[in-house]
Image (cartoon, rainbow, N blue to C red):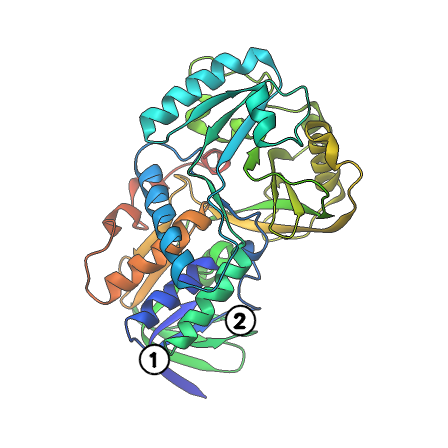
Amino acid sequence: MSESVDVIVVGGGIVGAATAYFLAQRKLRVLLIEAETPAWGASGRNPGYQWLHTRRAGLQMELGLAGRRLADALAQELDGFEFRPCGGMIYFFDERQRPLFETLVAERRAAGLPMELLDAEQARAHCPALSERVAGATWNPLDAHQNTQKLVDALVAGAERHGARILRKARVESLIMDGRRCLGVRTATDSFTAGRVVLSAGSWTPKLLAPHGIDVPITAMRLQVVETEPAPFRFAPLLYGPTALKQYTFIRDLPGYSEIGTTHPLEATFDGLEFLELAVQREDGRLLLGCPMDFPGLDDRPTVAGVALTLAVLSDAMPAIKSLAVERVWAGLLPQTPDALPIIGPVPGIEGLLLNAGHVFGNLAGPLSGKMVAQAVTGEATDFDLALFRLDRPGLRGNNDQHRRW
């Protein structure tokens, strides 16, 4: 069987769902094809951070701020996805880190964030679950939280209301090509043709393009998450711990940066893992704790080492969690590029094929990139110049080490 539409979107995560939603809003005939179910991959497995706190100054920050503004609008027009403009903080325990945090706050304010440095008492006022050993924290009121699974569900439902068709449990196995023109896609049982095909398959995008000699520098970072039972206590902000700082190149380049406090001793015990220390409480009271990071390819299974590292570090930082029951553990594959910016727009030299992939900060930039693809397809002015996100831009010509630092 063959079906022809205006646009095929491959991948039903936050990026693909948003692309389908904004295309369907513009009255195009849209087919969204998802290998499993919407938000099955990274979108349904991440802790839901809309995290401006550590976006690099310049284009990365501008994209994040624009995405944050769009989130406010989506919260008004879509079914509820537990959106909370709750603010975020990075706590620290070692007084020797205070000069670094003071420098970080000054740099963040210059980059456009209304950042503050909290003392110990203020930090615990924002989050009483923190250990009494806490020395202070940064605070950014613009950070926000969402249930990304529910956001994707709302985008898909919105796309369907506007006439899009959603094909679930249908894995795209290949592109249909006529020379240097993409005509559509094939699944195991069907073929589909379209005027344009948009690949939004996250970490799986390179696998679809490799048979056609197209190299896409997207690597998969595995992030593991532990979910607890509903806690008897509440806290509002998104939390990062000091071990997260080392993941950001601009922070490592700040005067006064050192490994003091940014690497937990247990990270050396679990060889191959680095820790992006974070915790957040969902609307239902459950805590999401994470995130051990490694690069095992397309293996999305959680590990004993990852769960052990998560619980050991965070139960020390937040003693109140020690008695909570663990209900679930999982891992997700976060796509990333050498310059930590997504790839958006036409594939050079291939007519009819567009990319919208490589979103390491997809909760912020994913919906906005879907809107921009829809704008480009319909000939509208895009919110950002898509030339900044082209596949052949200089920033993607990095080495593998760059994939490990944002």
Q: Which mark is residue 171?
A: 2
Q: Residue at point 61% right, 38% down?
A: 235
Q: Residues within 10 Å of mark 1 (few under 14, many from 20)?
A: some
Instruction: Pick the residue in front: 341 or 310.
Output: 310
Q: Which mark is residue 354?
A: none
**Residue 360, position in %: x, y?**
46, 45
Instruction: Pick the residue in front: 105 or 285.
Output: 285
Q: Amino acid at mark 1?
A: Val
Q: Amino acid at mark 2?
A: Arg
Say left or right for 187 vs 352. Answer: right
**Residue 158, position in %: x, y?**
42, 70
**Residue 99, position in %: x, y?**
48, 12
What is the spatial separation of the Cα atoms under label 1 and label 2, in whole angstroms? 18 Å
Q: Is residue 186 visible?
A: yes
Which is in the foreground here, disc 1 or disc 2? 1
Identify residue for label 1: 5
Q: Earlier in the sequence, mark 1 or mark 2?
A: 1
Q: Quadrant of the C terminus?
A: top left
Query: Is label 1 in a helix, a strand or a loop?
Result: strand
Say left or right for 59 vs 87. Answer: left
Q: Residue at point 79% right, 46% down?
A: 325
**Residue 172, position in %: x, y?**
49, 71
Residue sitting farthest toward the bottom? 1
